Image (spheres, rainbow, N blue to C red):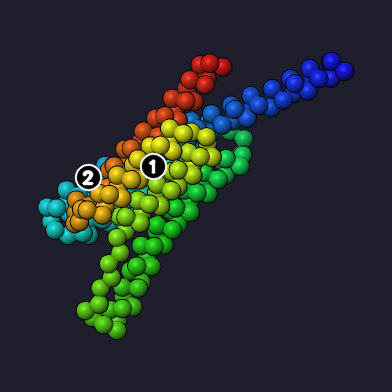
Amino acid sequence: METKNLTTENSLKIIAETMERSRMTIAKNTGKPLILWGCMVALTSVVVYFLWSKTGSPVWNLLWFAMTAISVVCNIVMDRNKEKAPSTEISRIIGKTWMWFGIFTTGLYLMIWVAYFILRAFNPEASIHVDLTLVISLMMGLCGVISGVVMKMKSVVACLVIATALSVIVALVVNGPAQILVFAILGVIGLVIPGLILQNKAKNSQISA
């Protein structure tokens, strides 16, 4: 009976250790993309702000599509070299969360343009005003918080809450080209810092193992 209990305890310990290693691998694999996207978002927001301010044309916001394409390619290259981890519910939730964030933000942008052209067809003087910066900031913050919660990383959740709160405040009080700098806040505090935290957690876990 004692041998059976020991075997059961060892089995549970092995399962727990395997799950923890898998969670740390997921954290490590999630950390690098967060750092990549955070740097790209922050850099693009500064570039767009500078060009928009100098030219007075918001057309420079199209650079966001170029940034997305470049980041996706870099992400694919990183995926080839990342440490493989078993597919778990955690990794699926994180992947699906950010996938739908991309779909919703792109879809929202396209729907606004479709609605604009429809309105202009009936009324040439019609205009649509949607604070995309505010909406996208809230959506990005929510996705980041969900990722932090499922990975049980309170520090990541805290960073996203702070970044989202600051971004929303800035988006509400600032207008024009300067508002785009909201994404620099989100990029650094909401993506780069959480990415570094995840990388550090994974590194320390490997050292302690």
In the image, what residue occupies the spot 57% across and 40% down?
Answer: 90
Report the residue at 45% width, 30% height from top: 198
- Image quadrant containing the N terminus: top right
What's the residue at 14%, 53% (across, down)? 53
Task: Please identify, in this view, whether the residue under mark 1 or under mark 2 is nearer the observer.
Answer: 1
Give percent across and percent down for residue 127: 25, 73
SS class, disc 2:
helix
Find disc 2 in the rendering and name its residue: 46
Q: Is residue 162 visible?
A: yes
| Image quarter of the C terminus | top right
**Three-letter code for the amino acid on which mark 2 is drawn:** Val
Image x and y of residue 93, in percent = 55, 45
Q: Quick one: which residue is furthest to the left in this view?
A: 54
Q: Who comes first in sequence, dot 1 or dot 2? A: 2
Q: From where the camera sits, is residue 41 visible?
A: no
Disc 2 crowd rating (10 Å Cα; few below 14, some 14-19, many 20+) is some
Q: Tell whether 119 sits left or right of 59.
A: right
Residue labelled with disc 1: 161
Judged left or right of residue 123, residue 193 is right
Depicted 173 relative to depicted 184: above or below? below
Which residue is most to the right? 1
Q: Foreground: 143 or 81?
A: 143
* Amino acid tagged 1: Val
